[in-house]
Amino acid sequence: MLTKGMGLLVLAAAVLAFPSLAPDPFILSVGVVIMSYAVLATSWNFVGGFTGYISLGHASYSGLGAYGTALLVIHTGINPWVAMILGGLGVAVLAVPIGIASLRVRGASFVIVSIAMVLILLLVFQSWGEVTGGSNGLRVPRPFDESVLRPEQHERFFYLHAALLAVALLVWWAIDRSRFGTGLKAIREDEDKAQSLGVPTFNYKLTAFVISAFFTALGGGMYALWFGFLDPIFQFSILVGSYMVLMSLLGGIRSLLGPFLGAVIVGYAVEFFKNQYGDTQFHLVAMGLLLGVVVLFMPDGIIPAVSQLIDRFRPQAASIREVSAGELAEQRRTASGPGASTAADPATDDESTDRLSEGVQR
């Protein structure tokens, strides 16, 4: 436990120190993208990690959160951060009927429903040009005045994304250790058996789904305020949802920091390939190969695989402990019961002593 705590402190210190260590604004902007990915992947993991339901359409909620935040700022003039929270709450409310409809199916059917959702929203937001800007895109007012230069905005948004990620991780950690989290993990392992044991499976799934949509929408809203421009083709892309799945699977969907580790690897790889190969689709090939390697060789993710490797080199706990003569005598008296004779047969006593002295299971 102490080792894990020290590791978290070191990780937090590294994250907080990154903006001051970044050599130029471009690297800092890459850091913001990675933190944005980490927020989205952690948000997705409320559903994928706890219930085992794989959604490829989670870009629906990040896109709705982004457009909801932008439209509130543009048409009402309210504070951008209030708009972001209201956008997240609005998406959470909308996720209730969506979840009621989609969570009635499982497996491949649920994946198809999630993909259909994001494709429908893509068509709606492309066609509704007078409100969303359509294919021309939508410019989002920046939350800081013009005196704040772009590199400084990158630094501020890096810390804001880190704060949002910390809140999402805290909520995930709390759920993981609660009775609610135990029920969700039972659903992940065997939903029918969990239901037969009295777990309200549908209500649990729906709650996790709404929480996931809420944090995903907040991540989308913060991205909109940082980037300053929204395009429905990107915001409602299946590729964005696929990245969330890949990041979580790569790091480990059953671990707290798995999606964050996956976001660091995948986010850096995506930006590297885009920078090296421009507008080509080579980065998609690389991501597909990475996903294939993960599924074949590390199906549980990097963190569980490394943990298992470390456990192999740890000394195994002994299953047999030494027992004193006094403990043996006490065990014989307990086993004999209150009505048994205190004068035990010597042969039986010796035989019992021999058996018990061989060792007692912990």
Image (cartoon, grey):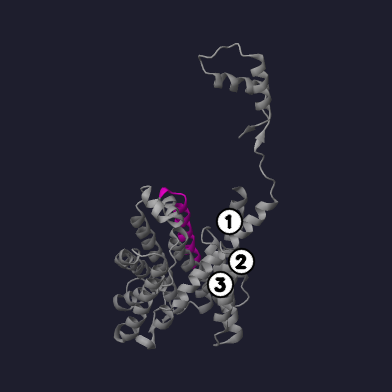
Kind of residue indicated by mark 1: Leu
Q: Mark 1 vs mark 3: give the one in front.
A: 3
At a point 61% along the width and 53% down the height, the residue shown is 6
Rendering quarter of residue 126: bottom left
- Magenta residues? 161-179
Alpha carbon separation for disc pair 2 and 1: 27 Å
Residue 354 in the image: state x and y as whole percent: 68, 24
Q: Earlier in the sequence, mark 1 or mark 3?
A: 1
- Mark 2 and mark 3 residues within 8 Å of each other at the beta carbon: no
Say if 357 sits above or below 277 in the image: above
Residue 16 in the image: state x and y as whole percent: 57, 64
Residue 36 in the image: state x and y as whole percent: 49, 71
The residue carrying mark 3 is 291
Residue 55 in the image: state x and y as whole percent: 43, 68
Magenta region, main secondary structure: helix
Label 1 secondary element: helix
The residue carrying mark 1 is 8
The residue carrying mark 2 is 297
